[in-house]
Every structure is written in structure tokens, then in C-alpha cells.
Amino acid sequence: MKKNILCGLTLVGVLTFGLGFLGSLSWLLDLFTHFRVYFLLYFFLLLTIAFIRKQKVAFLINALLSLFIITSLYTFYFPAPEETAAQGLKVCSINLLTSNHQYDEVIRYIEEEDFDIILFLEFNSRWAKALDELFTAYPYTHQKIREDNFGIALMSRLPLENSEVLILSKANMPTLVSDVRYEGRVLQIIGTHPVPPVGAFQFEARNEQFSRLNQLVKDSEKEVLLLGDLNCSSFSPNFKRISEGTKLRDSRQGFGLLPSWHARWFFLSVSIDHALLSEGVEVKARGTGPFIGSDHLPLEIVIDWKE
């Protein structure tokens, strides 16, 4: 590869990677934040070519960028938790996909995994009817059915208390809040699904929802589990609107990036399904479930109180 071509590819990589750091300014720039792992592969490829071609400047630039990205990914993988049988409250978040008709796959998955609490996203009347048989095992339900992609429901084996449906942005999408009493203590569960930021209005509405979620957590005197499809990568500068100034932390720390969308396009999959927890809650296990017909993989987490 000629020197000027390699320099040009390096410059393209630097510029596109850098655009993501301006993601708070525009929804288009925000899109560049999703693909940090793919930028790492790109820079590492150019680094290898520069090493072979003995092009020192290109090698140094790509090496520094690769090192920067690796450093930013470090906390998602280290320290890795001890591999023991996880015991605690077993929670799942499933973006069902309104057009998905694989009802039996979803029900089979839930019955096999035996969750304590499940958050359903894209929950419409058709899905409510299809999952009706689960109500015996999950008698406590808090839901807001919608026929678009923003219906939402909580199903629980444990009683749901102080349940509310909140509207946190000008897009008027519902957020569910419920308390669960587990082993004598109260956990506040916040299930949410902001609009995807594919336009100025949606971008502003999603960020408004993030900011109001932040205030909701700050106002709560309980331990919190916030989960759902947030339509945002944790590498986005907008993501900190949720946790900034709170005691929330990313449940993936030590478990890996765990990309969840797109379930069919694994080679372009990114992490936009999240579970954030306050400091009194410990993550015992964290992962993604199997393909069940949706464009999202289920989010699985086992949590317990910190000692």
C-alpha cells in the first residue's frame, strides 16, 4: 500500500472517530460513538500494514489510537468476576420487536431461564395476548400497552409496589417505575425505552429523557435498577446525562461489552440495551440471551444486595 494511501486512510479514521466526541451536538455525530470496537479493528489493521511497510508516522498514530481505545474498553473486561453459580434476583429485559411472531420461542426462553422479573419493550396488544399464559407464573404486572414500538411492561414473581407510568420527554414515551421488596429491602426498578435519535426532534427527546431519568434517580432514596433499550452507546457523550451526579454504574463492568443489537447482524452489533445500578446493588452475573426472533438479544442480569 502506497504511503499516501495509508496516510489518507489513517486521516479518515482519525476524523470519523473524533466526530463521536462531538456527539452531544448532533444526532449524526452521535452515531459515530456506537462503533468503538470496529474503530479499534480498523486502526489495528492500519497499524499492522504500517509496521510491514515501515511507515513510522502512520504506525505511531494508529498505535496510539488503538491503545486509547483498548484503555477505554479495559474496565468492561477487568477485573473479571469469579466464575461461581450466581444466586440472587434474576432479571431480564427483552425488546420483543412488534413485528416478531416467534411467541413460542420467547415463552420457552422465559420458562427455561426462570426469571424473577422481566421487562418487556415494544409490548403491544398482540404480545400481551401471546404472553397471557405467563401471568400464572408472573402474577404481578405493570404495563402500558401501545400499538407502536413503545409499549412497555413489567412482569414479576414478587409484588410490585408504588407503580407509576411517567412521561419524561416531549416524545411522550412511557417509563415504568415500580418498587420490589427483596429480602427485606426495597429496590426501585425503572424500565425505559426512549426514541431512537434519528433526527433532531428524536435526538433532543432522547436526551431530555436521559436528563429526567437522571433527576428521577437523584430524587430517589432507594436503591435503583434502571434498565431498557436506551438507543445509545455508553461511549456517547450523551450517555452520561443519565448517570452524571448519581451513584449509578454500568452493570457490564467486568463482564464485557455484551452487544445486543442488531441480533441478526452480529458483525455490526453494538451495546444499546443497558442495566445501570446504584451502589448498594451487586452484579452477580450479566449476559445476553439467545436469538428469539427480535432484532435485540435479551439482556440478563443477576443481582443481590451488597454485604
Image (cartoon, rainbow, N blue to C red):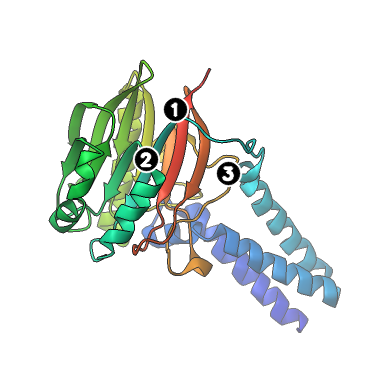
Is residue 180 toward the left or the right of residue 75 in the image? Answer: left
Mark pair 2, 3: CA separation: 19 Å
Residue on which disc 3 sits:
255
Is residue 236 toward the left or the right of residue 162 in the image? Answer: right
Rendered residue at 68%/66% (across/down)? 43
**Three-letter residue code for mark 1:** Ser
Quick check: marks 2 and 1 in contact, CB under 8 Å? no
Query: Relative to residue 206, is residue 283 depicted above or below?
Result: above
Residue on which disc 2 sits:
115
Quarter of the image where one finds residue 276: top left
Q: In the image, residue 258 lies at what x, y percent? A: 52, 52
Decide which of 171, 279 is in the foreground and name it. Answer: 279
Helix or strand or loop: what does disc 2 sit on? loop
In front of the other: label 2 or label 3? 2
**Three-letter residue code for mark 3:** Phe
Helix or strand or loop: what does disc 1 sit on? loop
The mark that comes first in sequence, 1 or 3, is 3
Quarter of the image where one finds residue 294: bottom left
Viewer can see residue 85: yes
In front of the other: label 1 or label 3? 3
